[in-house]
Each structure stands twice: as structure tokens, then as C-alpha cells.
Amino acid sequence: MAHSDGKYTDLDTLREQAVALRRRGYSLRQIRDELKIFNNDILNRLVKGEPAPEWTKRPRAKDDLRERARELRLQGWTYDQIEMELGCSRSSVSLWVRDLPRPERKRSPEEASAIARKGWEEKLRLRDEERQQTKEAAKQAVGSLSARELFLVGVSLYWAEGGKDKPYDRRENVTFVNSDPGMIQVFLAWLDLLGVERERLRFIVMIHEGADVAGAERYWADLVGADRSAFNKTTLKKHNPKTVRKNVGDSYRGCLVIKVLKGADLYRRIEGSWYGIVGSAREADQPNRT
């Protein structure tokens, strides 16, 4: 075998020298430099079977984690628990403990299901609590309304939910329909602001047949504070048997229609005010468009 300096030696002699150096604690690099053997395949063959000295072994950073994971697994911990405890990946946990027996199930499927259901219910409770806190904070942020603010709210409310004329059918009637008690109360407050006397109002309950009609009539009469004489005959809506209604139960009270008698002038004011809001909104947005 040829060395880099051109000298020749036999393989057995080289092996004896390489093994002697290895046992004295030499690394492969040191043996290579000492014996001038720069062919890695030959160098590895010369020291084959001889363990590397301890000082050349690179410590494995995860050895401690691996041993701890195995201890926990033997104690009956699940993959999820070990993962959370050690802060390592699930794939690492699986690799480290997959040769160990699975821990015995400590809970029946029913018990596990009950625990999961309880956890989900708690999550829903916290979510609902957060929802209510957000709504309450928004409610408090509104504060009291000025007359101008209530006026603008009422105009917008009517134009969204109230009856409107068509170019081909000019009637100029003021009619508001809604099932939300809050909407009804805001609309009535708005009419009061405009000086519309309650004597000019007529009410009609619209509800599906088969519902608690009498109860709905009492509910709306109490809400608006009107005598039964101010209510016209209730309109019953026929149920389509091919559809499944979801507006059922004790909370279903149908809709309330509010009509303003002699309301042509009021309707004109509503329509004009609405277009005034639209124009002002466009002007306010104009800087963002240029």
C-alpha cells in the first residue's frame, strides 16, 4: 500500500498501528494525520471493530427527554400528556416510547365521553360569557341618544323596515312591520319625537295560524301600551305543510304592523331625510375616493 510520501507498507502493519492509536484514544482524524492515510474507506477498514473513544462521541441533546418520556409512559401517561409535559413533538414521543406497552384504559368509554362533553360544555359557557361581555360593553358605549341621533336612527330604521312608495304606485303611507320588540319600541320613541299622536296609530298582529294568537295579541298590546280598540283584526297566515317552520314555541309572537293615519306629510319627510343622509354620507366619504 502506498503512502503520500511514496513509501509502501503492508495492510496488517498499518492495522496494528491504527488499532494501537485507536486504543490510546486517537480520533480518526488524528490516526489519518499520524499514519498519512487519506483514503477514508481504508482508514475505516483498519479500525473496524474498535470502539471510538468516549471523548469523540457527540452528546445527544434529547437523551434526557427520551428517558423522561419513557419513564412517564411506564407510569401510564398518554402521548398527549407526555407531549404537554415535555414540550416536544408527538412524533418524537412516538419514536421514543413506541416499543413500550400501552397503558391500561383507566376510564370506560362512557366516562371518557362524559368528561369530553363536560369540557365542551365549559368551553361553550366561556364562549357565551365572552359574547355577553362584548355585547354589554357595546351597549354601555352607546350611552344616551340626543334628539338628532334618535331622529337619524328612526329615519334609517324606517327606510330599512318600513313600507316605501314605488314610482308606479305613489301612496305615501307610513307602515312599519317587525317582529323584534326592540325595533318596535325604537320606532314608537321616534314617532313620539316627531310629535305623532298615539291616537293616529293603528296596530295589526300578523301571526301563523295554530300559534297562540290570543297570547300574541296581549303581548303586543302590553308592549305598545295601547288599548285593544287601537288594534285591527289579526291577520292569520296559513301554514304551508311542505315547509318546516322554525318560528314556533312560546317565544313566537308573530309580527306587529304599525300604521300612521294621515301620514302623507310624514312619509315625505322620511323620504327626504333619508336622501339627505345618503348625500351626507357620500360627502363624508369623498376624501377617501380622491
Image: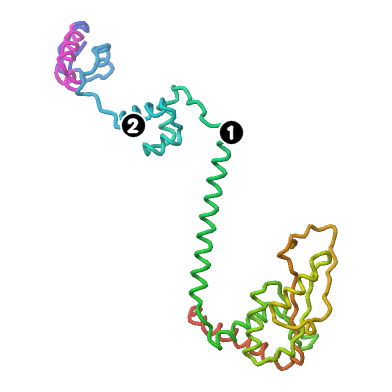
Give how far across and how far down residue 202 sits, in percent. 77, 84
Q: Secondary structure at mark 1?
A: helix
Q: Position of residue 75 (x, y in %)?
A: 41, 27
Task: Classify the position of the N terminus by image quarter.
Answer: top left
Residue 131 appears in the rendering: yes
Quick check: 20 left or right of 280? Answer: left
Q: Residue at x 81, y 67 (%)?
A: 208
Residue 172 point in image, percent of width and height: 76, 89
Judged from the image, the secondary structure of the residue bearing numbered disc 2 is: helix
- Vertical arrangement, residue 258 with respect to residue 127, above or below: below
Mark 1 or mark 2, which has the lower sequence index?
2
* Residue 49, picture quadrant: top left
Q: Which mark is residue 109?
A: 1
Instruction: Say whether residue 252 is left or right of residue 134.
Output: right
**Could you say which disc has been placed on residue 65 in the image?**
2
Identified by mark 1, the residue type is Pro
Q: Position of residue 27 (x, y in %)?
A: 19, 21
Q: Please, is residue 266 above or below residue 144 in the view?
A: below
Q: Which residues are magenta?
A: 13-36
Relative horizontal placement of residue 223, taking residue 114 as reference (left or right): right
- Residue type at numbered disc 2: Leu
At 85% from the left and 58% from the top, the residue drawn is 241
Mark closer to the observer (1, 2): 1
**Magenta stretch, overall SS:** helix
- Judge whether residue 175 is colored magenta: no
Q: Relative to 50, say whether 183 is above or below.
A: below
Does residue 166 appear in this view? no
> Which residue occupies 74% across, 63% down?
247
